[in-house]
Image: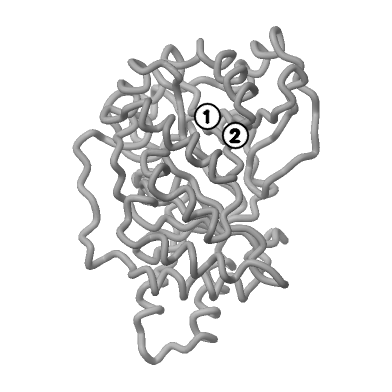
Amino acid sequence: MIDPFGRAITYLRVSVTDRCDLRCVYCMAEDMTFLPKAQVLSLEELDRLCGAFIGMGVQRIRLTGGEPLVRKDVMTLFRSLGARIGGGGLQELTVTTNGTQLTKHAEGLYEAGVRRINVSLDSLDPGTFKALTRWGDLEKTMDGIFAAKGAGLAVKINAVAMKGVNEDEFDRLIAWCGEHGFDLTLIETMPLGEITGERTDQYLPLSMVRSRLRQTWTLEDTDYATGGPARYFTVAETGRRLGFITPMTHNFCESCNRVRLTCTGTLYMCLGQDDAADLRAVLRDPSVDEAGLQQAIRDAIARKPKGHDFIIDRRRKAPAVGRHMSVTGG
């Protein structure tokens, strides 16, 4: 699949549920209204859609949420997709999780073919972690992280950088990740969905963070890439990688190779645009065969924009995109 700007689409992110067992302050409002279950695709339907994308050249699939591991029987989808890994088709199956369910599922993920995971962890301080997640328990998340490590999964920690909240913890996070053999990626907060509070109060440019970190750590250039938008450095003192995802300070759209599928079958060609394709209607139309499904996907890719329009500004009160990250897929 080639988009209008010559970019090959090889990476699909799939939100299997909009539900989550946490309420992170940058992601959700505390009092969320979730989708009616009737609107959500079955796991079999999600598997069929993923299969169509694989058949059209997608090489990497990441399952996300909400929190993907809270969806009932989601491991059946992991096993089905994992069975497709190899040959000229799917090359990698990964997951982004908040870690709360990993003590239960880590070994099953490895058995299904997952080899690396991203775990959201914005603070190593129990009080800050609780405040950020509203409902979270740092010990439970830590147990999940080390269960994943014990199962043989490579763990990458994702931390959203927030001004005045966790910006004094980045040195500690780098050292902790180095101690336990984890990579770390810092992420700029993005203007997605209505939240409680003001995003301009949260926003911390990672260009500033990187300059500060260089005062303590030696950040060596590397050409390492995972297929996602992060730019990586090697921390010489720990030997681990440090990534930066910078949708605000350094737009990475020119190399975008991904699209996002929601649990309702809506395909977003860009995280920061509202244009979307309704694949659920196509999927559930008995008159549409596999070729018709692939044509609907091809038509959607033909509308993929050049880039997003993210901006965080006190003069612009509304989010750039009204839907929450949990709807699109984190």
Across and down, in percent, residue 222 comes to: 80, 33
- Who is closer to the viewer here, 67 or 261? 67
Image quarter of residue 25: top left
Up-down: is 119 above or below 293? above
Total numbered labels placed on residues in the image: 2
Label 1: which secondary element: strand
- Who is closer to the viewer here, 230 or 253? 230
Quick check: can you spot residue 219? yes
The residue to which callout 1 is attached is 188
The residue to which callout 2 is attached is 245
Up-down: is 119 above or below 164? below
Mark 1 crowd level (few <14, some 14–19, many ≥20, 10 Å Cα): many
The disc labelled 1 sits on which kind of residue?
Glu
For image coordinates 39% across by 51% down, the residue present is: 68
**Left or right relative to 159: residue 38:** left
Please identify the residue farthest to the top as the structure is shown: 215
The disc labelled 2 sits on which kind of residue?
Ile
Across and down, in percent, residue 41 comes to: 33, 68
Sequence-earlier tag: 2 or 1 = 1
| Residue 197's disc number | none
For image coordinates 61% across by 42% down, the residue present is: 154
Quick check: can you spot residue 321? no
Across and down, in percent, residue 87 comes to: 72, 72
For image coordinates 37% across by 31% down, the residue present is: 26
Q: Are marks 2 and 1 in contact (CB under 8 Å)?
A: yes
**Left or right relative to 69: residue 7:** right
Label 2: which secondary element: strand
Image quarter of residue 45: bottom left
For image coordinates 59% across by 13% down, the residue present is: 171
Where is the N terminus found, in terms of image quarters? bottom right
Across and down, in percent, residue 92 comes to: 63, 58
